[in-house]
Image (cartoon, grey):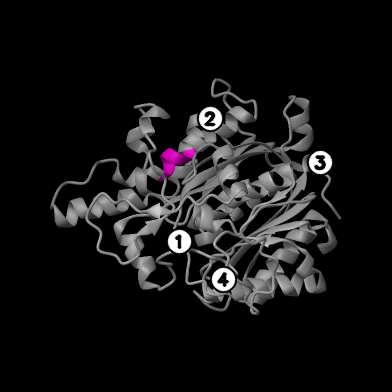
C-alpha cells in the first residue's frame, strides 16, 4: 500500500562535467553529448588511462564566499553550489533559516579526496606542514555539515558512505525521514571528485577503466569512465510543500535497499533484484507501471551482465519492452555521487517523457538482453521510472520517481 505521507522534490541543482546547473546535466544526457575528455591533474600523471568526466572550469570564488572556502574541498564546493541552485528553485532563501524540521543527508564515497592527496603530498613528499583546516575539509561529514550551516538546517545531519550507492541511500533515507514525520523537509544528494593522480591509478589497477569509450550493455564494452560532480534535491512532504506554495517537480515515490552479503567486488543479481523489488513495494507500484529504468550500467563486463540478470528476475517477460539506459558514458561514473546525478537525469526523463540514450553502443550482447535505448534519445510516455545504484561490498539502492500530477 502506498504511504499516506507523500514526498515530493521541489528543487534540484547540480555541478557536473556538463557544467553548472541541473539543466546542463539533463540536456547533455538527453542529447547524448559526452562530457568525457582528457583528464587534467595538478601534478604529473603516469597512468595509462587518461580520460575522465571531470568538472572543468569551475571557479569556486564565483559561487562561494571567501569565509566559506577555507573549509571546502572541491566536493564541498560543488555541493554548496548545487545546493544553492536547489534551494532557489524550491522557493527558499538563505535569509530564512530552515530550522529543526529540516534534515541534511549527503552521500559521498570518500569525501575530500583532493584534500587527502594534497595533504599527503605536502607532508610526505615536500615535508611541509599540513594546512590547519585539512581535517575539517577532508572528512565526509564536512559535506552535510557545511550544507546545514549554510541554510540553518538544524534537523538530522549526517553523511552516508556506501561507495557507489552513497547518494541513492542518502536520498532514500531522507525521503523516509520526511515520510515518517520526523522532519518536513530534507536536503539530500551526493558529491564526489576522485579524479586525482592516486585514485585514477588505483581504479586503473582494478582493470575496470576504459581507455577510450564507455559503452554499457554493448558487445565489446571494456570498462567505465570516472566522473565527478554533485547533485542536490530538496525533498518535502507534499502537503507541507503545497501549503507554502511550492511546486512539485516529481514525487519521490519509493526507496529500496539491500545487501548481497557475498563478495566485496563481484555483484550478485539476487541482491540487486531484491533491492529493486523493495523499491517497487515501497512505492506501491507494479512492474507494469515502470516505464523507464535508469540503470547503474557501468560499462564493465561483469556489472552489466549482473544487472541485466537482476532486471530479468524483476521484470520477467516484460523486460524486453522496458527501456533501460545508462547515462554514465555522458557524465561519468560519479561513484558516491552517481545516484544523485542519475536521479536528476531520471527526473528529467519523467518530466519531459524522453528516455535518454546509452551512447557509444555498438551491438547487442546476448548476455545483456535489455533495450538499452542505443545512441539516440527516445520520446515516449514516462510516468513512473526506476533508477539503480549498486556498489562494491554488495550495497544496493534503488529509487522510484512518479510524475508530479500523481503526487
Kindly state the secondary structure of the residue where label 3 is placed: loop
CA gap, disc 3 and disc 4: 32 Å
Magenta span covers which residues? 75-79
Kindly state the secondary structure of the residue where label 4 is placed: loop
Residue, far right: 1
Instruction: Provide residue 18's location: percent of width, then percent of height.
Output: 49, 44
Q: According to the image, label 2 marks what residue?
A: 151
Q: Nearer the viewer, mark 4 or mark 1?
A: 1
Residue 225 is labelled as 1
Which residue: 14% across, 48% down? 128
Give whichever of 16, 202 is nearer the camera: 16
The answer to whether residue 68 is left or right of residue 174 is left
Residue, far left: 127
Pointer 4 or 1: first along the chain: 1
Residue 394 is labelled as 4
Pointer 4 or 2: first along the chain: 2
CA gap, disc 2 and disc 1: 34 Å
CA gap, disc 4 and disc 1: 20 Å
Q: Main secondary structure of the magenta part?
A: helix
Instruction: Provide residue 315's location: percent of width, then percent of height.
Output: 78, 69
Q: Toward which corner of the image does residue 45 lie, by quadrant?
A: bottom left
Where 202 sits versus 343, above or below?
below
Q: According to the image, label 3 marks what residue?
A: 407
Amino acid at each position: 500500500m502506498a504511504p499516506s505521507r507523500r514526498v515530493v522534490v521541489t528543487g534540484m541543482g547540480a555541478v557536473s562535467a556538463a557544467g553548472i546547473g541541473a539543466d546542463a546535466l539533463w540536456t547533455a544526457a538527453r542529447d547524448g553529448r559526452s562530457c568525457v575528455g582528457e583528464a587534467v591533474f595538478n601534478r604529473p600523471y603516469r597512468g595509462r588511462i587518461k580520460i575522465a568526466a571531470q568538472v572543468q572550469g569551475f571557479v569556486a570564488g564565483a559561487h562561494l564566499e571567501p569565509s566559506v572556502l577555507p573549509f571546502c574541498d572541491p566536493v564541498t564546493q560543488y555541493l554548496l553550489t548545487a545546493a544553492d541552485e536547489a534551494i532557489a528553485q524550491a522557493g527558499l532563501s538563505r535569509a530564512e533559516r530552515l530550522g529543526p524540521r529540516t534534515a541534511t543527508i549527503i552521500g559521498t564515497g570518500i569525501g575530500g579526496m583532493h584534500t587527502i592527496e594534497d595533504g599527503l603530498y605536502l607532508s610526505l613528499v615536500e615535508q611541509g606542514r599540513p594546512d590547519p583546516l585539512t581535517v575539517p575539509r577532508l572528512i565526509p561529514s564536512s559535506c552535510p555539515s557545511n550544507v546545514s550551516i549554510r541554510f540553518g538546517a538544524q534537523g538530522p545531519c549526517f553523511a552516508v558512505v556506501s561507495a557507489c550507492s552513497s547518494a541513492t541511500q542518502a536520498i532514500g533515507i531522507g525521503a523516509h525521514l520526511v515520510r515518517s514525520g520526523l522532519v518536513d523537509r530534507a536536503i539530500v544528494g551526493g558529491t564526489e571528485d576522485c579524479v586525482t593522480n592516486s585514485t585514477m591509478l588505483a581504479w586503473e589497477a582494478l582493470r575496470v577503466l576504459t581507455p577510450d569509450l564507455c559503452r554499457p550493455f554493448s558487445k565489446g564494452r571494456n570498462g567505465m569512465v570516472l566522473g565527478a560532480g554533485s547533485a542536490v534535491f530538496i525533498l518535502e512532504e507534499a502537503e507541507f510543500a503545497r501549503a507554502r506554495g511550492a511546486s512539485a517537480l516529481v514525487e519521490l515515490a519509493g526507496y529500496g535497499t539491500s545487501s548481497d552479503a557475498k563478495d566485496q567486488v563481484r555483484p550478485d543479481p539476487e541482491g540487486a533484484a531484491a533491492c529493486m523489488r523493495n523499491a517497487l513495494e515501497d512505492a506501491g507500484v507494479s512492474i507494469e507501471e515502470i516505464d523507464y529504468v535508469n540503470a547503474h550500467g557501468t560499462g564493465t563486463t561483469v556489472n552489466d551482465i549482473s544487472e541485466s540478470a537482476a532486471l530479468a528476475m524483476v521484470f520477467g517477460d516484460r523486460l524486453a519492452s522496458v527501456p533501460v539506459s545508462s547515462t554514465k558514458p555522458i557524465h561519468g561514473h560519479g561513484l558516491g555521487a552517481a545516484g544523485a546525478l542519475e536521479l536528476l537525469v531520471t527526473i528529467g526523463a519523467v518530466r519531459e517523457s524522453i528516455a535518454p540514450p546509452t551512447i557509444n553502443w555498438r551491438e547487442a550482447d546476448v548476455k545483456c538482453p535489455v533495450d538499452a535505448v542505443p545512441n539516440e534519445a527516445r520520446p515516449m510516455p514516462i510516468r513512473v521510472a526506476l533508477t539503480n545504484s549498486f556498489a562494491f561490498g554488495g550495497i544496493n539502492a534503488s529509487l522510484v520517481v512518479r510524475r508530479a500530477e500523481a503526487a
